[in-house]
Image (cartoon, grey):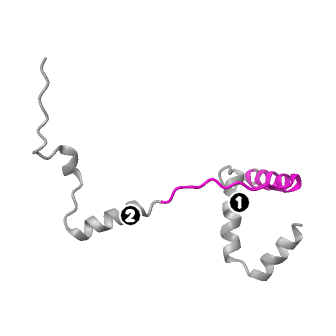
Amino acid sequence: MSRSKIDFANKSKLSTLREPESRNDELQLSYSLTKIQRARVKSFRLREIDIQNLDNTVKRINMSGKIQPILSTDLIKGLLVMATQMNEEKLINFIKMSY
């Protein structure tokens, strides 16, 4: 069985699947591809009591049954969102209480 030779002058099926109709669509497509953000690994040192508090809070949330089971990472992400919406004075007081 002989193989057919590839003709690079012709467009392939894959190249015709999504061709931008105009220059604006092409720019929008390239912008959306550069906008993708990947998660970065960031590590923190926590005291033993902080890890226990984190684990206990995750267990308490998972036991409530109001949401699908979460991980400690999900809890930290939620706390970060909550901190962005919280009053600075209240946040400072909670930080002082953690020492």
Residue at 38% across / 64% down in the picture?
Answer: 32
Q: Between marks 1 and 2, how big is the CA–CA gap?
A: 28 Å
Q: Residue 61 location, x and y as percent?
A: 75, 55
Residue at (80% x, 51% y) in the render: 55
**Residue at x 24% of width, y 54% of height:** 18
Residue 4 locus on image (x, y percent): 11, 28
- Give how far across and how far down residue 24 sits, in percent: 25, 71
Residue in the foreground of this view, choosing between 56 and 84: 84
Of 49 and 60, the residue lying toward us: 49
Depicted 5 relative to depicted 76: above or below: above
Instruction: Please give the label number shown on residue 20.
Output: none
User: SS at mark 1?
Assistant: helix
Q: In the rendered view of the protein, which quadrant contains the C terminus?
A: bottom right
Is residue 50 positioned above or below 81 on the image? above
Residue beneath disc 1: 76
Residue 12 in the magenta stretch? The answer is no
Tell me the quarter of the image containing the N terminus: top left
Name which residue type carries label 1: Ile
Select label 1 or label 2 by which is in front.
Answer: 2
- Quadrant in which residue 27 is drawn: bottom left
Q: Is residue 57 left or right of residue 97?
A: left
Q: Which residue is mark 2?
A: 32
Q: Earlier in the sequence, mark 1 or mark 2?
A: 2
Q: Which residues are magenta?
A: 37-62
Classify residue 6 as left or right of residue 65.
left
Q: Quadrant of residue 6?
A: top left
User: What amino acid type is highlighted by mark number 2?
Assistant: Ser
| Left or right of 50, for residue 23 | left
